[in-house]
Amino acid sequence: MSGSSGGPIESRLRPGQPAPVDLRVLVVGPVGLADVATEARRIERLLAAGGHAVTVHLAPRESWGEGAFRAAATGGVDLVVVLGGDGSILRTARWMGYDQVPVLGVNLGTLGFLAACAPAEADAALAAITAGQFSCVDHLMFECAVMRGGTVIHRELGLNETSLLAGPPFSMIEIALHVDGERATTYRADGLIVSTPVGSTAYNLSAGGPIVRKDLDAFVFTPLNPHTLTNRTVVDSASRSYELVVPRPNPGSACVVDGRVVTGLIAGDRVSIRRAQPRFTLVETDRHGYYRTLREKLEWGGGLRGAGGRPSASPEGS
């Protein structure tokens, strides 16, 4: 994937300032997901009644491919409203490519960690956005390049993670990690996840990796079932360049970006990961703080559930 041609698509949204009276909104979502079409038309009517220009783009998941966003964004876009779950957010980030504009996610899926706004809250969120009562949180994106024999055979822009997976016949593989050209370590494991902070609550978290605040610029390296107990998760700066080498992959070993298999791996392949120039931007209102999302989506709180978020009066808590 390479940078788009032509000038950037720039949003006129500015936190703390009322939105332009002719706000340009693109509403996107996957065809076939329950309530997507109904919610898209409702949001379209709501914004159009306020004088804003709205385009609805509902399409099958597989059609959200590279190069299609600029065509859908003819005339410019200030805000993209994504209907669906976190998968829809990831597809939208990939679809926008190097033309990233701010995104409001309306959760019609299951977890909805990125698509944090419930449908019942969408009206209030849009009203806050048009009044300038919102913040924009930029998220690290990365470029993953697979090199074979000195030639880049695949390049991908991602938001959550790159994973090298052992695959069939499901024996462990070795993965050498190089940082800024210096060998750091060799993992012997079922695979390795290289996650961004926003991806730290996805595959990385399921594999036992840490939660990293999503506005940090860092990469998280989490081995899958490592043979050596001293191989633990490492968090390092996104300002560095990273390269992974699998000297003896399995026949089914693969490089996966944001849940999509981008290519199989053969001996000698090198996978580079580095910070990308574009940033993925989520629009947040006061209703959806970072820790509220962690509490509600990941069911944090334990015995504090139902306590209204108030700290206990005693050190022991309840």
Image (spheres, rainbow, N blue to C red):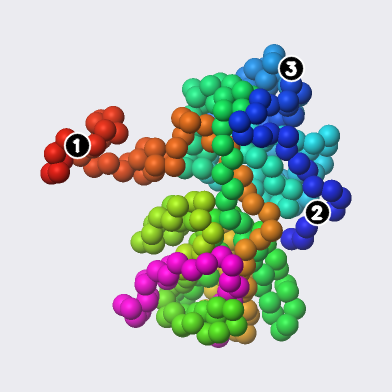
Question: In what element is the residue under mark 1?
Answer: loop
Residue type at mark 2: give it: Ser
Near-viewer residue (157 or 91): 157
Mark 2–mark 1 distance (CA, rounded to whole Å): 52 Å
Eye-nearest disc, 3 or 1: 1
Which numbered disc covers residue 312? 1
Is 98 positioned to the left or the right of 287 in the image?
right
Label 3 or label 1, whichever comes before in sequence order: 3
* Horizontal arrangement in the rendering, residue 170 relative to residue 9 (left or right): left
Q: Earlier in the sequence, mark 2 or mark 3?
A: 2
- Quadrant of the rendering where the C terminus is positioned: top left
> Can you tell which mark lies on residue 51?
3
Q: Using the rendered image of the protein, determine whether residue 60 is visible from the camera's viewpoint.
A: no
Q: Which mark is residue 4?
A: 2
Magenta span covers which residues?
A: 222-249
Which quadrant is home to the N terminus? bottom right
Q: Please check the rendered image and state whether residue 215 is part of the magenta-colored stretch, yes or no.
A: no
Instruction: Decide whether residue 228 is among the magenta residues.
Output: yes
> Eyeballing the image, is 57 above or below 215?
above
Between the C-alphas of marks 3 and 1, the distance is: 47 Å
